[in-house]
Amino acid sequence: MSGALPGEAAQVEQQRAEQHFRDHVDRHLPRNARAFLIHGMLGMTGFRLVTAPTFVPAYLYLLSGSKLTVGLVLAAQYAGMAASSIWGATLIEHRQRVMPLIYLVGWLVRGQILGLALSALLLSGRGALLAAAAFLLLFGLLNGVQNVSFNYLTSKIIPLARRGRLTALRNFFGGLTAAAVAWMGGRYLVGNDVFGNGYAATFLAAFVLTSLGISALAGMREPALHDVRMRAGFGRRVRELPALLAADRDFVRFFVARALVALGMMAMPFYAIYAGRLLGLDGATLGYLSLAYLLAQTGSNLAWGRVADRHGYRVVFLASIATWIAATAWLLACATLPGFLLAFCGLGAGFGGFFISADNLVMEFGARKDRPMLLAVSDTATFGMMAVGPVIGGLLAQSVHFPLVFVVAIAVKLAAFVLALRIADPRSRRKRPDRADDMAGLRD
């Protein structure tokens, strides 16, 4: 072990291990990039069908007839993600390789999508609603661990200088597939009530696609890390969080701003329901709105990724929030299908830019060995707000009226935008030795 060597020899050994790590990353980058892209094209397609603000909210509303119930069930999903993120970090931060855990958790996540599909096919009424709530809660709990683990893996195998372009291409191809499947799901599966339940057929398609996606990860070659943390208990790591956060005020500003935007997502489950009240929420309308949302999310990613590589993720973070605010305001002025399609394009572009920037900006803070916990802290705050948001939105929509939900969402995102203006771009800060992995990536 390098810690047993005298100071100078230990430093040489550390440098040798770091160079070996870099050589592995460079040697396997083409192979890993292909697997990364294929996983995104197939796996993300399935997840987007489940997480887009169309199919699941519409299905829950069909079962319950209650906007508050829609908010509560989706809140349970995000509460699960918030509850498991820090635990997920403690599972991976001592591991030299995280792929085995990603496979295990990834298949368990996909099992919940299959359960959602089968429950929609075999159950009805209250039974189907309770089953959907249970599967979405488990989906959230497992996805919290998966999200931290996969983002950490990405930070290991994709150099920072290439991360923007590859992430953008991944989202682009995944989004194109998702948009096509979403349109077909709405137009043909839901519209024609395939299998006697078009929603069940759509969720089943999501399961098949996500399963093909995770299979593509078999082509990845993950390097072993030499500078991992010693294994520590969950309680101890939680007690160490205040000191970790106090070391970087810009990170604190970032994760609070990200959490505020997530709280502003209180309106997301109600985008399609609101449009449906004015247009009629049939399968064709659902398909067109999903297509507009996902195509905009997809197409904008190429632009967001290019901006990120040139100017950093902070710029994308700010621009995407502004786009999201403008699209939500436009939604309130809509009364026709073309107007709503334009609004959903803006919502998709804003959402896509926000997540490509938020997921990657967090990986530019801190030392590499601290990143699992920084990812987890940020995810916990974000998903916690995403759990609270739908409940608040559901209460407002149920007891007051829809426009107030969107006005509150706009106000919260404006607060996030103002706070984000105070974040110093991590790339512009003085080079630190423990961030040499990223600095080397930027010089590539």
Image: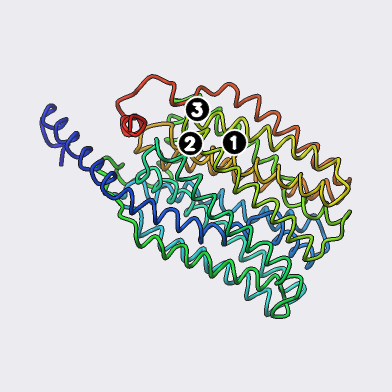
- Amino acid carrying label 3: it is His
Of the two numbered discs 3 and 1 on the same chain, state the one appearing first in sequence.
1
Up/down of 220 relative to 188, above or below: above
Residue marked by disc 1: 258
The residue at 60%/39% (across/down) is: 354
Q: Quadrant of the N terminus?
A: top left
Q: Amino acid at mark 2?
A: Val
Measured Cα–Cα span from mark 2 to mark 3: 16 Å
Amino acid tagged 1: Arg
The image quarter containing residue 432 is top left
Query: How far apart are the alpha carbons under marks 1 and 2?
Result: 10 Å
Depth check: give the residue in front, 314 or 187.
187
Residue 310 image point, x, y percent: 47, 29
The scheme the figure's colours follow is rainbow
For marks 3 and 1, give the CA distance: 19 Å
Are the residues tagged 1 and 2 within 8 Å (C-beta)? yes
Residue 401, image x, y percentages: 88, 46
Residue in the foreground of this view, choosing between 227 and 354: 354
Residue visible at 59% across and 36% down? 258
- Mark 2 or mark 3, earlier in chain: 3
Residue 275 point in image, percent of width and height? 83, 52
Residue holding disc 3: 311
Mark 2 lies on residue:
362
Q: Secondary structure at mark 3?
A: helix
Q: Secondary structure at mark 1?
A: helix
For image coordinates 46% across by 48% down, the residue present is: 148
